[in-house]
Amino acid sequence: MPLAGKGMLLTSMDIDPSDEAEFNRWYDREHLEERVAIEGFVEARRYIAHQGAPKYLSLYSTATFEVLDSAIYRTALASQTDWSKANIARFKNMIRAVARITVSRGQGRGAVLGIIRLRPSAGGEENLRAALEDVLDPGLLDGIISMHLIESDPVLSKPLTDNPSSSDPGAGDWFVLIDATDVKAIPAVTARLEETAAFKSAVISTGIYRLMWDLAKSDLPPRRKR
């Protein structure tokens, strides 16, 4: 599979313009490296919106889905640095999806990411998954490198800034990820997917994001791994 591992943590958020410089400094100088260093995490990617919301998006791949419900990861969440706590408190409109990678086809990663948020109807999950398995083929359209489906766990997918006991109907949402070489390649994919009735009825939102940078476990100095 072009996506490393079997699990994925997706986080997306807005931040006030007055806090953006500090937010980006924290992400780039501490947070991404800190997360990739956790045992079982494989790589991470940061994006900024070209079209869509929230403005910032990060994807963290894990060797297995179970890593995202492990004691090691829970300890990391409970042991945030002061810098992390200050920035997390400033998140707005946060999306946090703890997901299984169920479809991943193609080769490599693109400089652009299309993202489609889906909300399967109750009992319609199997039909939607089957429909997507048929159409997530990056070889059918120019400029598409790889295509993926991730399915959120509704129990684990809780925004860090929300009351974890509150109901969230979107906690079980799915996301189609489209790795592309150019922003112009994404709309054709979305249009093609919308020809599938099961897909079109489940769409909540779409967006196009530009890659800021990525970090793999192999990039970390050995002394920083844990």
Image (spheres, rainbow, N blue to C red):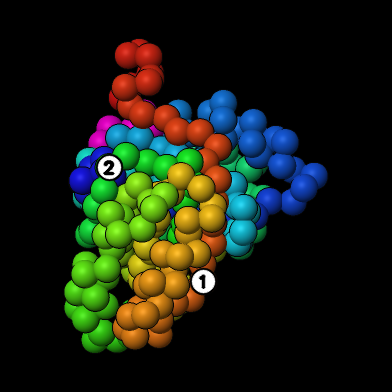
**Residue under the point 46% across and 44% down:** 181
* Residue 208 image point, x, y percent: 54, 56
Classify residue 58 as left or right of residue 103.
Answer: right
Report the span colored magenta: 36-40
Secondary structure beneath disc 1? strand
- Tag 1–tag 2 contact (CB < 8 Å): no
Is the residue 100 above or below the residue 75 in the image?
below
Please rate how many residues cluster around mark 2, counting C-alpha atoms within 10 Å: few if below 14, some from 14 to 19, many from 20: some
**Residue under the point 32% across and 14% down:** 222
Classify residue 19 as left or right of residue 14.
Answer: right
Indicate which disc, 1 or 2, sits on the residue closer to the N terminus: 2
Give the residue at mark 2: 107
What amino acid does circle 2 point to? Gln
Please rate how many residues cluster around mark 1, counting C-alpha atoms within 10 Å: few if below 14, some from 14 to 19, many from 20: few
Tell me if I can see residue 149 in this picture: yes
Give the residue at mark 1: 205
**18 or 108, which lies in front?**
108
What amino acid does circle 1 point to? Ser
Disc ID at residue 8: none
Magenta part, dominant SS: loop
* Residue 97 image point, x, y percent: 40, 59
* Residue 117 image point, x, y percent: 44, 68
Which circle, 1 or 2, is nearer the viewer? 2
**55 or 69, which lies in front?**
55
Is the residue 202 above or below the residue 211 in the image?
below
